[in-house]
Image (spheres, rainbow, N blue to C red):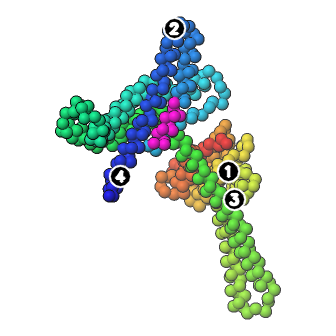
Amino acid sequence: MTIPAGLRRKVVRAWRDTGFLAAGVLPHLALVPVSSWAGLTIARTGNWLLTVPMSTALVLLCTLVLTAVQRARYRVFIGVDVPRLTPTAPEKWTWASAAQWLAATRPWRKVGYHLLLGPLLALLELLVLALAAAGLAGVTAYAWAWMLPTGMRQDWFGNPTQLSACTAAGLLLLCALPWTAGAAARAEARLALGLLGPSRAQRLQERVDQLAVSRTDLIEAVDAERRRIERDLHDGTQQRLVSLAVNLGLAIATRPDLPSDAREEIARAHLEAKEAIAELNDLVRGLHPAVLEDRGLDAALSGLAARTPLPVRLRVDLEERVAPNVESVAYFVISEALTNATKHANATRAEVIVRQIGEVLRVRVTDDGLGGADVTAGTGLTGLAKRVGSLDGAFHVSSPVGGPTTITAELPCAR
């Protein structure tokens, strides 16, 4: 005889939930004798100054043990993981910081769960177990009733109709057992998640911290990949183009006997190779300038200002090198601002100020161009605003029509 899969799942689930409830009776009642003993000791001795702290410490210690036991019970029987609440320890322990750390662990919720709610849950569990025992007794009524002596069987049941009623009632109780045991298990799981685990605000804060860490890791991975591409282009493709340009130049210089058409084609190829090298240099510097990684932001900005085809007044005031991702974002903000001032604003001069103020790197680029730049217009400034925002920085553009244009970025640079 094959048991249907749906019935088999219900039986297994009912057996699991019933075992879960049975395993919770003793842990839920464990703090009752401890608290009763503590109360009797306080009342008997009358020494409140000594017995109250000792009793409180004993209750808290038992609460820690019982919380661990309950977490294991939820995880093993019904697969519910009650998260641990592990607040960050303060850097310097004082009475205020210790009280704040203790409040963050929410010990009184755990004490309330084990001391006040525990006996009620134990009563609920015993009730479900009693229903399960009554159902099993009713279903097997014929089996154990006919094992009794005839006189006792007649005194207890009188006639077979009572046995049939007991069997039917047992079947009804067993049919209701998956629902009752499952409802009790789900109710306990919700209470445990709310009282033994972190609060909703703490879970949200933990999630925010995890997202911040993952975002930082992603930014660092993107920067590392950008630097790898820059190295590959610089050490591979660029060197091959340089070698090609040198060979073409040597061919023109050392082969004067070439036909004029061939010399023109070689000269044209030589010129295109040099233009490709120049474009590749710009591309490499746009990905990640090598000088930025080797010598820092000050040296990279000095080279950028020297290459810009307009006078740039540069002032860099840094206490120390900041994080690589902060250097990269600051460099590209200044590079894009100077490019816009040269190509679109028709500026005649620009000023770049980079200053570290505490844990904030402030970047300001000012030009005397035409103005009218709009960060919401979907231009390159939009990408800069997003890059600055990826580091939780602030980006602001002031560009009235007629100029001047001032681009300001504030980047957190705490290591």
Report the number of numbered marks.
4
Please identify the dominant SS of the magenta region.
helix
How many C-alpha atoms fall within 10 Å of the one at disc 2: few (<14), some, or many (≥20)?
few
Residue 71, magenta (yes or no): yes
Q: Nearer the viewer, mark 3 or mark 4?
A: 4
* Separation of marks 3 and 4 at Cα, in angstroms: 66 Å
Q: Residue visible at 62% across and 21% down? A: 95
* Residue 347 in sight: no
Q: Which residue is mark 2?
A: 44
Return the residue nearer the eye: 132 or 274.
Answer: 132
Q: Is residue 164 above or below residue 286?
A: above
Return the residue nearer the eye: 229 or 199.
Answer: 199
How many C-alpha atoms fall within 10 Å of the one at disc 3: few (<14), some, or many (≥20)?
many
| Upstream in sequence: badge 1 or badge 4 | 4
| Mark 4 residue type | Arg
Residue found farthest to the front: 150
Percent x, y of residue 318 = 72, 43
Disc 4 on helix, strand or loop? helix
Q: Nearer the viewer, mark 4 or mark 2?
A: 4
In the rendered image, which quarter contains the C terminus? top right
* Separation of marks 4 and 2 at Cα, in angstroms: 56 Å
Q: Which residue is mark 4?
A: 8
| Mark 3 residue type | Pro
Q: Nearer the viewer, mark 2 or mark 1?
A: 2
| Upstream in sequence: badge 4 or badge 2 | 4
Q: Which residue is mark 1?
A: 324
Q: Residue visible at 76% across and 81% down? A: 247
What residue range appears in magenta? Answer: 66-77
Disc 1 on helix, strand or loop? helix
